[in-house]
Image: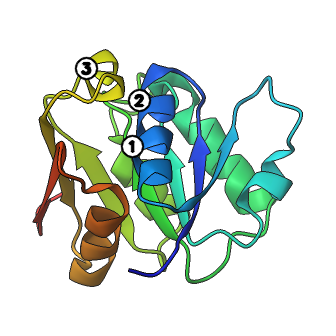
Amino acid sequence: MKTVNLTVLGAGAWGSALASLASHNQHNIRVWSRRSDLSLADAVKDTDVILSAISMKGVAELANRLNTEVKVADSAIIVTATKGLDPATTRTPSQIFSETFPTHPIVVLSGPNLSKEIEKGFPAATVVASTDEAAAEQVQALFASENFRVYTSPDP
C-alpha cells in the first residue's frame, strides 16, 4: 500500500481517533487546529488527503480559507467527517466542500462511531461515500484495519 500524506483538520476526539487509525497504517499524518502552532498553509502543503473533523459551525469558514488563503493540491482528496447541517444554509459539509472545490473528489466518512471506543481498539465500522469510486477506495485503504472496517458507497 502506498504511503499517504494525510492532514487532519481538527484535533478533537474524532480527528485524533482518525489520525491514530491512519498512523497505525503507517501513513504520514499532520494534525491542525485553530490553536496549533502549525499554519493552515503548512498543514495542507504537499498533502494527498485533507480530512475535516471540525465542528459544523466552522466548516464553511474553513472551506473558504482553504480556497482563498491556501494552495490545496489539485489532486488532493477532501474528506469530511463532520456531522450536521450548516445553521445558516442547511447545507451538509460535503455540499459546502463540493461547492468550494468543484474539481476535487469529496468523500464523506460516516458511521455509528465513538471516538473513545476506536482509540481503545474496539471493533468498529464506517462508510466512506463518494461519487468518485477511486477516491473512496483510497480513503478506505487509509483507515481500514483489523479492528476498523471501512466500507465504500457511491452515495454520499
Secondary structure beneath label 1:
helix
Left or right of 141? Residue 112 is left
At 22% from the left and 56% from the top, the residue drawn is 128
Q: Nearer the viewer, residue 31 or 105?
A: 31
- The residue singled out by tag 3 in the image is 117
**CA neighbours of label 1 inside 10 A, class few (<14), some (14 to 19), many (20+):** many
Secondary structure beneath label 3:
helix
The residues bearing labels 1 and 2 have C-alpha atoms spaced at a distance of: 7 Å
At 38% from the left and 35% from the top, the residue drawn is 82
Quadrant location of residue 70? Answer: bottom right
- The answer to which of marks 3 and 2 sits earlier in the sequence is 2
Secondary structure beneath label 2:
loop
Please say if 5 is above or below 12: below
Q: Position of residue 57 (x, y in %)?
A: 52, 23
Q: Look at label 2 and name its amino acid.
A: Asp
- The residue singled out by tag 1 in the image is 93
Which of the two discs, 3 and 2, sits closer to the camera? 3
Res. 69 visible in picture: no
- The residue singled out by tag 2 in the image is 86
Q: Nearer the viewer, residue 101 or 111?
A: 111
- The answer to which of marks 1 and 3 sits earlier in the sequence is 1
- The answer to which of marks 1 and 2 sits earlier in the sequence is 2
